[in-house]
Structures are given as structure tokens and as C-alpha cells.
Amino acid sequence: MYKQEIENLIHKCKYYQSRSEYRSFNSLNELPIIDRNVVRDNNDQFIINKCLQNAVVKETSGTTGAIVKVVWDASDYYASIKPIWMIRRKFGITPSDVYITDHAWITNASINPGIKIYIDNNRISLSKIYIDDGTLMSYVNIISQSSPSWMMISPSFAIVLGMYLKKCNLVLNSIKLVELSGEYVSDECHEYIEKLFYWTIVKSQYGMTECNVIGYEHDYEKNVLVTVPGNIMEIVNCKGEPCLIGETGDVLVTNYSNRNMPILRYRTGDVATLLEKSNECLKFKIESSRESDYYTYKGIKYNSSIFYCIVQQYNNHFSDYSIDQFLFIGREKESLLAKLHLKTGFELNCELRIKERLEKIFDSIIGSYPEITVEIVNTIPKMSKKKSYFVVDNVTAQE
């Protein structure tokens, strides 16, 4: 359907021009699959015009080790977000409304990692690291003062903010929509966030800086997504062949709407199940996220949401030493260092008791447990990129 348009983009883009495999093709699935490392390492070659007068420049967070700059022609960028805004308007919000996002510690040209609250026109971005009750109180105050109509936040941040609101018996009445983005969200996690934000609408969306929004939650099926015009999404098996209905495979995205930086057959690192397909429109469900969202134990990969389940069970069973924030650090021989901030006070040597409880819950969930070292901390520390991290209630898993 978009063959001619994609051919034109290939002829203009330096990266594709220099590679013979792009010179002739009959269908999109004949083209090579590229991953984030290719785009990161050849960033300038993907940009057709680096001197656009009316450019919209977006940057990735840098979790892969370097920031990818995505450069749009302004007219293409605003055309690309029209479909998603047709959906959002159904919830009573407009592009000019004040809204809330979150940001992590990763250095970004537009957001200093040391800044707790960053305001850019109608966007208020809240840091999701170094979070404590004082920080959350300041967040709630600025939200109350600015009266945003919606939020586009990560599930982990939604949980910690929602838990604080519940603890303080507070409701943010101006919020008409909580849009979950940026992390894998399980059905259980989605349901839990809905309970925390019971007075408003909670929807999942699937997208990334490189491609804008790819899919949005179905009107009547929770946590099931439907593709949004502007990208071509494929779900392929381990051989690179299209998945059949009901099959699970890797997600590929072709962003044909960014004519200044086309990315073709881009492997997102996510896994999805194909539920329905009608021409270019897919109905799908994200099953798991990128490698940094996993903890491998005895050769089996567990999504980092397992840590959320463990902490939730722990708090349900034990009223003393209840957990407020958790940071799991993957170490050698599959062991874990658990840095935790408690809701209540603690006694000398309570780490051993907490360790035994966590290991028992681990065993009940996966039939075994890793060696866990528990460390009580006052605040969750800044993360290094040298190890794997799995965090509950404040920061998404990163690697």
C-alpha cells in the first residue's frame, strides 16, 4: 500500500542509499530488520535534512547508552499526532490543556536530571527518582494549583503517585484521563492503577519517541491495543515471518509519516500477540517488554512486574516493616540486592527477617528463590548503567 512512498524515502535517506538490500523490493517484509543499535550508531545518516527551518526535534531518554535525536518536519509531526488527538478528545481534553508527564535520571538535552519539576509551556514533567513523601506532597500541590486535565505517565510512577493519593485520601478532580506509556503494563497492574485513580479514566497507549504513538487501548477491551494511523506495525516470528492470528512475536514498526527521518522495520524490543488484522490495522496485546525489563533466574526470564507482585504480597501479609519503595539490583550468580525504603520504622537486624519473608514469597510464586541481600535505605539512590535494575513503586526497570 505504501510501497511507492517508502521507495521515495529510501532514495532520499543516506543510510538506505548506501545499502544494496534496499535498492529493490516488492513488499515491506523483504526489507532488513533494524534494531535500536543501528539507529543509535547511525543517527545522522537517517536524517535527510539536518537544517530544516520548521523542525520538531525529539530525543530518546538514552537508556541504550546514547540519546537518539529524531528530527521531524513540523508539518509532518503535527499531522502524525492528529489521529491520537482524535482519540484523546473523546475524553474531553485538547492539545492546549495543561498535562503531566514524568522523567527519569537519564541525561537529556531538554531535561536536567537534577530537576524535580520541569515546566515547558503546558507540560509539567515530574521526576520519578529520589521520591519520598515530601516530594510527592510538592507534586500534588503543583498539580492542584495548575489543574491539568490529563496525565501521560509511566505505570510505575502512576502507582507511586496513586498510592500516595490513597494514603492521604486525596482526589485530583481536574484529571480526566490517565494515559499509561513508556513501560510494559500487565493486566493486574492496569487494574490496580484503575483502582488508585478510581474517579477518572485510565488508558494504555503503546509508542516510542522514534515513532510517536503506535497503538491505543481499545474502547471496550482493557489493555488490548489497536494501531493508530501513521505507522505500519508488524508482529513476526523468530524467522521474521508474519505471525498468524493468536500467535506471539516481535514487534516491528515502520514510521513512514516522518519523511525527514524514516525508520523502516524497526525492532522495538517488545513482544506482542496478534489478535485481529484488517488491512494495515492490527488489534494486539503487548505481552512483554525489552530485555532490560527482565530478571533471569535459572535460565527462565521473568518480567520485572514479578517484583511488583512480590512486594504487593509482602505488604498484604505483613503489617510490620511494610515496604514503601523498592530497588532490586541484579548481581552475579543471579542474586539480588534489595534496597528498600520502609513505610514504618525498623529495628536492628530486621533485614534478616525481611529477607526470609521475601524469599518465602519468591518461592511461592516461582517455586524457588535467589539469594537476596536486604539493605534498608532512607531514599532510593541514583542508578548506574552498569547493572540491571528492577524497581517497584518508583522507577521503571532499566539496564
Image (tube, rainbow, N blue to C red):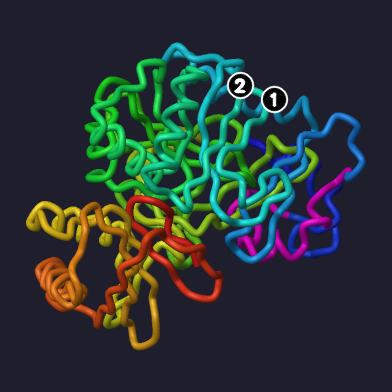
Q: Residue at x 64, y 66 (%)?
A: 65
- Residue 182, image x and y in percent? 48, 46
Q: Which residue is mark 1?
A: 78
CA distance for labels 2 and 1: 7 Å
Residue 82, disc = 2
Question: In which quarter of the view is residue 34 placed?
Answer: bottom right
For the N terminus, which image quadrant?
top right
Residue 41, magenta (yes or no):
yes
Q: In the structure shown, which secondary structural element does the residue marked by tag 1 occupy?
A: helix
The one of 124 and 217 positioned closer to us in this rendering:
124
Q: Residue at x 61, y 21 (%)?
A: 82
Against 152, residue 383 (above or below) is below
Q: Residue at x 81, y 58 (%)?
A: 15
Q: Amino acid at mark 1?
A: Tyr
Q: Is residue 129 left or right of residue 201?
A: right
Range of residues picked out in magenta: 25-49
Q: Amino acid at mark 2?
A: Lys
On the question of residue 87 being in view, the answer is: no
